[in-house]
Amino acid sequence: MQMKYLSTAFYVTAAFVLVITVWQLVIFIGDYPEALLPSPLMVFYGIITLIQDGTLFEHVRVSLFRFFTGYLSAVVVAIALGLVLGRMTKLWRVFEPIVQVLRPVAPVAWSPFIVLWFGIGNMPAIVIIFIAAFFPVLLSTVSAVKKIDKTYLKLAQNLEIKEMSLLYKIIFPAAFPFIANGLHIAVGTAWIFLVAGEMIGAQSGLGYLIVDSRNALDLDLVLAGIIFIGVLGLLLDKAVGLFEKWVGKQWGVQSN
Amino acid sequence: MSVTAENKPLVELKGVEKEFSKQGDSKKVLSGIDFDIRQGEVVSILGQSGCGKSTLLNLIGGFDRPTGGELFFDGKQVTKPSRRAIMLFQYYALLPWRTVLKNVELALEPEGLSKEESRERAIRYIKLVGLEKSMDQFPSELSGGMQQRVAIARALSIRPELILMDEPFAALDTFNRYYLQDELLRIQQQEGTNIILVTHDIDEAVYLSDRVFIMDANPGTVRKKITVKLPKPRDRAHSDFQYYRKWILDEFNFSYTQDQLDFNI
């Protein structure tokens, strides 16, 4: 176990060193002006300033708040709807084409309407994250419900368990390991659209930090923002991965 | 047992038929099934795989409807599954995210008992199958035999009049199977539950049943009903046991020799 962590740490450090080296080499060889490509050191100082004056934490806090509000509300609505639609085959056949048409549309495409309907501030980002997270969770829930072992349904019929009880005591837990898969995918997609969401009408957040720094031509801060979005995205993904593992263990589906 | 209860059959099948149609192609799986099951009986339905015995069990349990004939449970036509006739599934159908105790408690939920009453009853039946030490374990932590016992406890806790078993011990090794068969007989005598058991294990049928129904395939019919007149518990090695065993074996062999005659001519 200890060895595994050590070797992971080694490879991560190697990747970090590789990126910094290549980046610095490009600057040396290409002789780019700093206004076009800031050096690693500049970005490092940029990160330090952002941490020192506390603006970074404010941006991260606001972004995480928007992310979780949009993501969690999407999860609740999509799972509830998915459980019902997964059970009602005919209703799903009506809804499926609608969902399939709406799903490939990038959530940002709705931004003109979003600003008209929800104004500016927190709402546009939250709504965009909601849309981004909604479809993967809905689709995975519906297909999970359809995939449930039919024996569980026979058992429920035999025990004369009421439909509501059946939904949250048997169907939801039976489908949950597959739903968790959708939750994982949705974290990724939703986080990607956070930046896009915060570029519309927001005055704070990591996406705003990037837009604002670009407008001020502070490209070092743009890169600092990109790095933070990437690192936070990675951490969120890892957290959901751990959650998924825990679910698997609790449900006895995965052996590890 | 009262006289009226003894006269009235618990399960009654009159000319039951079942056809499955697939893409316009229909196949008759069961044809002209007639039998009664009396109060307190253990009956085995014995046949080769594909003879429609599981389909028959599903019809009796109300999971599927016959395409012809009539099927009664306690004098009423069977239209849907009910808590009065509990099915034990081949792979136990335990909910893997619930502990043993919670699995049994789930079955008691529709009874509207108080939390204490329901827990008390669940524990009583878990003790009956000898799993009081595993009450808080998850099904994945139990062996196949133990899982089957949880399923039996769950079924019994509902206090059904009839338990339907679809090859209940097929997935177990011989020793566990013998052990659980003994347990089942003991519990059955204690609780007075009726059992209909689908199996392809001749020993199991003779060991457990008051009557053995032998099925033929294509379409599935009950060819013979054999009453096993031996006191329980039975001695698997006794000559009387072997007598019934041979009788049933001959029943199956008989159909084979008929096949062979065709070749000889």
Image (cartoon, coloured by chain):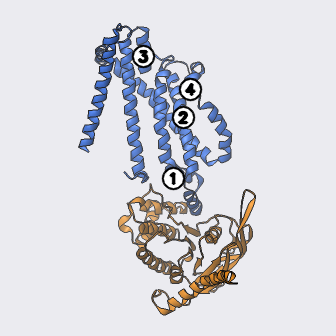
Alpha carbon of mark 3 to alpha carbon of mark 1: how far? 45 Å
Left or right of residue A188: residue A228: left
Alpha carbon of mark 2 to alpha carbon of mark 1: how far? 23 Å
Q: Are marks 3 and 2 in contact (CB under 8 Å)?
A: no
Q: Which mark is residue A169?
A: 1
Q: Which mark is residue A134?
A: 2
Q: Chain of mark 4?
A: A
Q: Colour of chain A?
A: blue
What's under tag 3, amino acid-wise? Ile
Which residue lies most toward the bottom here? B239
Alpha carbon of mark 4 to alpha carbon of mark 1: how far? 35 Å
Q: Chain of mark 2?
A: A
Residue B45 drawn above or below residue A169? below
What's under tag 4, amino acid-wise? Ala
| Mark 4 or 3, nearer chain start | 4
Query: What is the quadrant of residue B220 in the picture?
Result: bottom right
Where disc 3 sits, the SS reads helix
Q: Which mark is residue A210?
A: 3
Q: Nearer the viewer, residue B59 or A106?
A: A106
